[in-house]
Amino acid sequence: MENNDTRELLITRTLNAPIELVWEVWSNPEHIAKWWGPTGFTNTITKMDMVAGGEWVLTMHGPDGTNYPGKHFFKEVIEFKRICYEHFHPHFVATIDFEADGDQTHLTWHMVFDTTEILQAVIKAHNAAEGLKQNIEKLSAYLANKMNNHA
């Protein structure tokens, strides 16, 4: 088994929402546009064809007005289980695993970069580890809002 420790970002979180809702906010572009990215970022989703081989094109709008275009290709999509996509510039593969646990969902999010040097450059230039943490926090807050609106 290959050791990805030096070129991987990993975060796990238990979300206080059932897997059906977690999957909905991940797979529906109207939802993901509202929570994706670090704190202060907004998004424009141009295309999101969430099937293996499908394309996901978005622009993240930074709080300082800078736009960050992104393009991904879905490698694997298993409803309520896994989303795996490939990102370019920098190149990495992200795998998000979902596990239902009653009214909660356990989430494991791996991002594997081509090299340790690329990962370190992304962490240094974009504070990627903190950005991933903020992304999960925005997802949790979005889910909490959805749960409160349906209570």
Image (tube, helix red, strand yellow):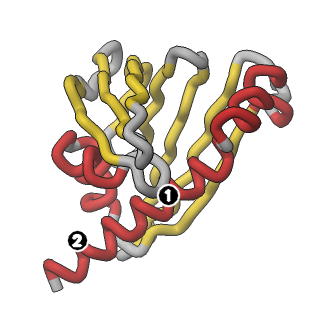
Tell me the amino acid under the disc marked 1. Answer: Ile
**Quarter of the N terminus within the rendering:** top right
- Residue 24 is left or right of residue 86, and the answer is left
Residue 102 or residue 21, whichever sits in front: 21
Residue 88 locus on image (x, y percent): 51, 15
Residue 12 or residue 128, whichever sits in front: 128
Residue 124 locus on image (x, y percent): 75, 36
**Quarter of the C terminus within the rendering:** bottom left
- Residue 73: quarter of image: top left
Residue at 16% from the left image edge and 46% from the top image edge: 30
Disc 1 designates what residue? Answer: 136
Q: Residues within 10 Å of mark 2 (few under 14, many from 20)?
A: some
Q: Earlier in the sequence, mark 2 or mark 1?
A: 1
Label count reads 2
- Residue 95 is left or right of residue 80, and the answer is right
Disc 2 designates what residue? Answer: 146
Question: Which secondary structure, mark 2?
Answer: helix
Residue contact between numbered discs 2 and 1, judged by CB atoms under 8 Å: no
Tell me the amino acid under the disc marked 2. Answer: Lys
Question: Which secondary structure, mark 1?
Answer: helix
Q: Distance between the Cα atoms at labels 2 and 1? A: 15 Å
115 shown above or below 101 = above
Residue 96 locus on image (x, y percent): 50, 42
